[in-house]
Amino acid sequence: MRRKRLVIFLVLIAALGISSCRTTRNLTDDSIKPLSTRRLVKKVEQNAFDYDFLTIRRINCRFSGNQNNTNFRVNLKAIKDEKILVSISKINIPVGRVLLTPDSVKYVNYIDRNYFVDDYSYLSRFLNTKLNFEIVQSIISNNAFSYHDYESRANFTHFNSSVEEGLFLLESGEEQKMYFSPLNYALTKLIVNDELNARELEMVFEDFEKVKKKDYPGTIEMNMVSRGERINLKLRMNGFSTDKIDELTLRIPDRYEQIRVN
C-alpha cells in the first residue's frame, strides 16, 4: 500500500507536468506556413506561460496501471524559483502533501503516518530521468522544452520542423515528437520513444484556458509504457489563480516515521 501511494505520487510529479475555456482547433496543413526550427522554437518560447505565483485549486486525477486504479484530487500552489506545494486528497480526506524546493523534496503521508526528506536523486532514479526543481517548475508552466535536458537552443540543431495534422511538428527522428498549435504555439502533444530504457510516453494537452493572458491546458492525459508496466493518468484542472502567495510550509508531525529512500 505504501509503494502504491508512492508510485502515484511519483507519476503525478512526472506529469505535472498544468477565463473562458476553449479547445485548440486544428487547421489544415495547406493553410499553415512552415517555420524553420529556430523560428518555431523562438515562437514557442515567446508565447510560453510564466508566473510569479500560481494556484490550481482543483486537479481531478484518474490513475490506472497494470494492477492499480484510483481517483484522487490535487491542489497545487507555487512560488516561482522558491517552492511548490502539492496537496493530495481522496473523498475529501487528506492523503499526503509534497513540498518541493530547489534543493529538497519533502513528502508526508497522512494515511501511513510517515514521511521522507530527500534531494532529487531518488526521484531521478525511480523515474530513470534527470529531475530537479527547475524541470518540475518548467513542467508546471507547460514549457515544452522541460521534457528533455536542453541546456541551450543549440541542442535543437538535430530537430526538424514541419507541419502535420494541422499542427507544427518538432521532431528528432522517432525519438521525440512535439506538436504545437499554430494559433498560440502551445504544446498540444508530446511523444517520447526511449529505446535505451524501454519506455514510451505520450502526453496530450487540451481544453486550454486563459491564465495571465496566456493559454494553459485544462486537461492533460499521459500514457506511458515502461518495461511491461502500462500507466494512464488523466488530469482535469480548474480554479487557476496568479494572486500573490505569502508563504508555503509543510509541517511534519513529531510521531511520524521517517522513510529512508537512499
Image (cartoon, rainbow, N blue to C red):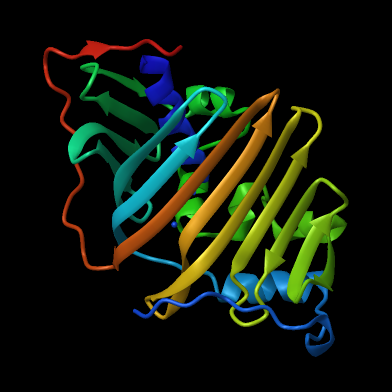
Q: Please say if 132 is above or below 55.
A: above
Q: Choose between 80 and 222: the one closer to the eye.
A: 222
Which residue appears at 24% of the width and 16% of the height? 112
Residue at the farthest left position: 254
Residue visible at 35% across and 50% down in the picture: 60
Instruction: Where is residue 257? Give x, y as percent.
Output: 23, 10
The picture quadrant where one finds residue 167 is bottom right
Whole-percent x, y for residue 252 in the image: 17, 24
Please name whichever residue, 98 or 154, is drawn nearer the observer in this view of the structure. 98
Q: Is residue 84 visible?
A: no
Q: Is residue 152 left or right of residue 158?
A: left
Task: Tell me the quadrant of the picture where the N terminus can be found.
Answer: top left
Left/right placement of residue 258 relative to residue 42 reads left
Where residue 254 sits: x, y (%)? 11, 16
| Residue at 62% across, 32% down | 129
Q: Identify the residue shown where x is 45% and y is 31%.
A: 69
Give how far across and how far down residue 74 sits, in percent.
31, 45
Instruction: Say if 107 sits above or below 218 in the image.
Output: above
Residue 142 appears anywhere in the view? yes
| Residue farthest toward the bottom in the current orientation of the protein | 31
Q: Is residue 18 left or right of residue 171?
A: left
